[in-house]
Amino acid sequence: MKLSTLVDSVLIVASIALLPGIGGAQIATNNSDEFIAINSNNLFTHSTNVSYLKPFDAAFLAYQGNLKAQGIPSGSALVSQYQTGSLTALDVVKAAVNAKKLPAQALNDTGYLNAVEWQLTSFSNTNNLSY
């Protein structure tokens, strides 16, 4: 078997293997009408056809202080309020929706809310580590 035949065979098999992912891609637009490719296989199973920030990014926006205008504290204050129960994942998601970082559908997406909750918990656990 010639090397070029082997390479062609590998490329054909790889193309066939990647075809379902390519076929599942969708086109969306952002507010400036630029096209964005979205792979529907990566969206949460409970979401509708809406692309969200990743839950980590939504929680990290709050942690960095990007949701202060919506009443969400940043850094250790965010972690402290979350640990005492005076701040929830729903509060963070509501603030992100109000800041136009997330669509309103995220408020009803339990999978997304649970993932943001997990991220907030991980921030709490990280701050409790002692060296």
Image: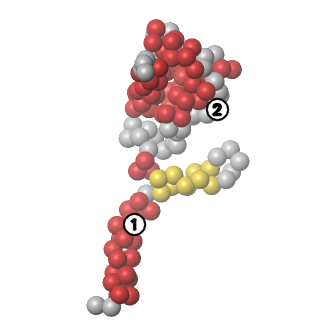
Kind of residue sitting beneath label 1 = Leu
Left or right: residue 85 versus residue 101 is left
Determine if residue 117 is in view. no
- Residue 3, horizontal then vertical, whole percent: 35, 87
Which numbered marker is on residue 37? none
- Badge 2 crowding class, 10 Å Cα cut-off, few under 14, some 14 to 19, many 20 or more, is few
Name the residue at 48% across, 44% down.
49
- Residue 109, horizontal then vertical, whole percent: 44, 31
Name the residue at 66% across, 20% down.
68
Q: Is residue 18 above or below residue 93?
A: below
Image quadrant occupied by the N terminus = bottom left
**Considering the numbered disc 1 on the image, is that residue within a helix, a strand or a loop?**
helix
Q: Is residue 116 above or below residue 88?
A: below
Report how far apart the C-alphas of labels 1 and 2 lie in the structure: 34 Å
Q: Is residue 118 above or below residue 34?
A: above
**Residue 75, image quadrant:** top right
Left or right: residue 86 versus residue 69 is left
Camera-side residue of 103 and 85: 85
Residue, disc 1: 19
Name the residue at 64% across, 32% down.
100
Residue, disc 2: 100
Image quadrant occupied by the C terminus = top left
Name the residue at 47% across, 20% down.
127
**Considering the numbered disc 2 on the image, is that residue within a helix, a strand or a loop?**
loop
The count of marks equals 2
Kind of residue sitting beneath label 2 = Lys
Determine if residue 52 is in view. yes
